[in-house]
Amino acid sequence: MGERISNVFRVDYYGTPTESLEMTRHVRNYDDVGILVSIAGSSIPLSWISYAQTQFGLRLGCGITAVSAADFYPYLNSGQFTGMLAGMRDAAEYEQLLADKLAARGPEWALRNRGSEAMSSQTAAHMAIMAFIIIGNIAFFASRRRKK
Amino acid sequence: MNISTDPWIWIGAILTLAIFSFLYKENPFYRAAEYLYVGLANGYAITFYWHRILMPSLISPVRNDPNPYVKLYLIAIAIIGALYFTRFIPKVSWLVRIPIAIVMGYSSGAYIPRAIDASIIQQLKATIITRATFVQVWDGVWAVIIALGVIATVSYFFFSAERKGVLKPVSYLGVVFIMVGFGASFGYTVMARLSLFIGRLQFLLGDWLGLIK
């Protein structure tokens, strides 16, 4: 695809040649792509780093599940990812950013902020888990001291 | 309360509750939902490969491409790919080694040099500290912490020398960094699982029961 995208994707689902589509007519290869954003629930964005970013210098962004975030941060730190949306927190931030932009267009563009709504539940659950971890640690050290 | 009248929402809600019923104990509702999920996922994957890969990349060009060499090339590749199915015929099952060898060889040649560049060289470059790193003070501080973390963590996995002298505190620091890494992974995993649960509750209480808007 670094040489010619239509060599890999010759036709679309309906059999129309990709080179004749309005959307892809002017996109010959990665040189014609400003940024590639990979939204995935797996390690697919890492493949894009190997194949598109390292080899052809394409700018990459990714939207990933929180599970993968800790594995992907080194690539953001090294600049191999230009940007990263990790998990619900970043999704809520992006949602807010988008909502602010769309709000300027009028009330009919208002979105239901599902991500931002969920963040309060997420925060409460995190606080509960942190409390359990602290209580668990206190209990562990207390029982160890008692055994001594 | 504004309960949905959409049958698909009801199917989704019932299947969600069937999956959640596993929290009580294994039961026929959970098993039915699980088998349905596996069947649907397989069915989707097969139709996806058929319509998005086999049709446009093999069947359609073999039928329509005017160049006979392209047709021969694609048919030869299809035959090699079909050798995977010899696994089911014990007498000729050794033939499966041919496509496996081709895939392994191609993947190694195509991927290893890029992986070395992407995951080792570029990552090492990111740990190099220069004067420019300290233009923003905090960037500089974090760069030093990252470089220290890399050195300490790598030293923990250095088994060619006994852990004494300088190596002992440095490798101990490596353990601290590893634990911080595991902690971050655990935290993010908890966040991901909670996100999924919250998403399902939004669906049940919002889309299905209409209790939240």
Image (spheres, rainbow, N blue to C red):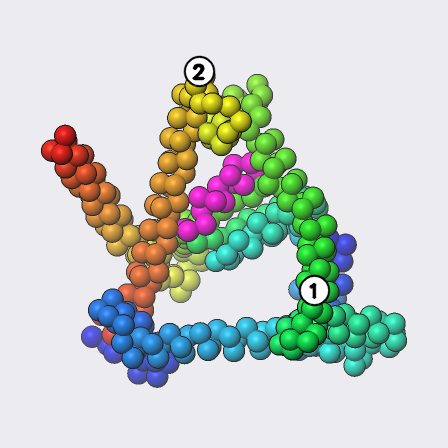
**Most common SS among magenta residues:** helix
Secondary structure of the residue carrying tag 2 is loop
Subunit that carries the residue with mark 2: B
Residue range in magenta is: A66-79
Residue assigned mark 2:
B165
Query: Label 2: how many residues lie within 10 Å, few (<14), some (14-19) or many (20+)?
Result: few
Report the quarter where the C terminus of chain A lies: top left
* Residue B31 % position (x, y): 34, 76
Q: Quadrant of residue B166?
A: top left
Query: Label 1: how many residues lie within 10 Å, few (<14), some (14-19) or many (20+)?
Result: some
Q: Residue at x 88, y 72 (%)?
A: B69
Look at the picture and state if B140 lies above or below B10.
above
Label 2 vs 1, first from the N-terminus: 1
Three-letter amino acid code of the residue under disc 1? Arg
Report the quarter where the N terminus of chain A lies: bottom right
Residue assigned mark 1:
B97
Q: Is B57 or B79 nearer to us in this picture?
A: B79
* Residue B181 % position (x, y): 41, 38
Residue B39 visible at all? yes
In the image: residue A70, left or right of residue B66: left
* Residue A112 % position (x, y): 35, 62
Residue B163, labelled with which disc?
Answer: none
Structural distance between the alpha carbons of marks 2 and 1: 51 Å
Q: Can marks 2 and 1 be said to lie on one chain?
A: yes
Q: Residue at x 73, y 65 (%)?
A: B98
Image label count: 2
Secondary structure of the residue carrying tag 1 is helix
Residue B82 visible at all? no
- Is A77 covered by the magenta stretch? yes
Subunit that carries the residue with mark 1: B
